[in-house]
Amino acid sequence: MAKRGGYGGMGMMPGNMNNLMKQAQRMQKQMEETKAELEEKVYEGTAGGGVVSVKMNGKKEVIEVKIKEEVVDPEDIETLEEVVLAAMNEVLRLQSEDESEQMGKIAGMGGLGGGLPF
């Protein structure tokens, strides 16, 4: 005798499906709120022992570059370029790590009220 299992044979009751939908909506809202919070943050990456500093917002827009005078050598532009590039890569890495951590908290910890029911 074949089992009759509600939605697609998965055995999920309509009440469980409603709860799952509500949990998914809560998770979506948490993700949107977290994304908005992340976009407001400012991240700073430095390189060359702090001679170059780059600030970026959570939208990955560079908003400030500071270069200390002692690193500016007209005879060695290549070193300055490398230090600026290193600071930019550092700030991108910091922002990406923070974004991954914050979003991971929602998805992994039970942004759905303790996890998915399956």
Image (cartoon, rainbow, N blue to C red):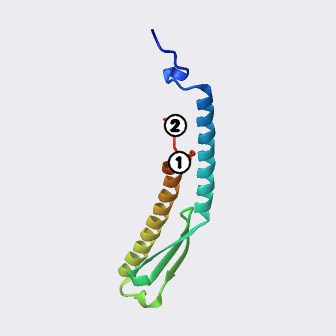
In this picture, is 69 found above or below 90? below
Side (left or right) of 13 relative to 69: right
Q: Amino acid at mark 1?
A: Gly
Tell me the element at label 2: loop
Task: Please give the count of numbered marks on the rendered protein.
Answer: 2
The quadrant in which residue 59 appears is bottom right
User: How many angstroms separate mark 2 from mark 1 (CA)?
Assistant: 10 Å
Q: Quadrant of the N terminus?
A: top left
Image x and y of residue 65, in percent: 52, 77
Image x and y of residue 99, in percent: 51, 59
Image x and y of residue 93, in percent: 44, 65
Whichever of callouts 2 and 1 sits on the residue coming sooner in the sequence is 1
The quadrant in which residue 61 appears is bottom right
Tag 2 and tag 1, C-beta contact below 8 Å:
no
In this picture, is 55 found above or below 28? below
Could you tell me which residue is drawn at 55 percent across and 20 percent down? 6
Could you tell me which residue is drawn at 40 percent across and 77 percent down? 81
Q: Amino acid at mark 2?
A: Pro
Residue indicated by mark 1: 110
Image x and y of residue 49, in percent: 40, 83
Q: Of 76 and 48, which appears nearest the observer?
A: 48
Residue 117: mark in rendering: 2
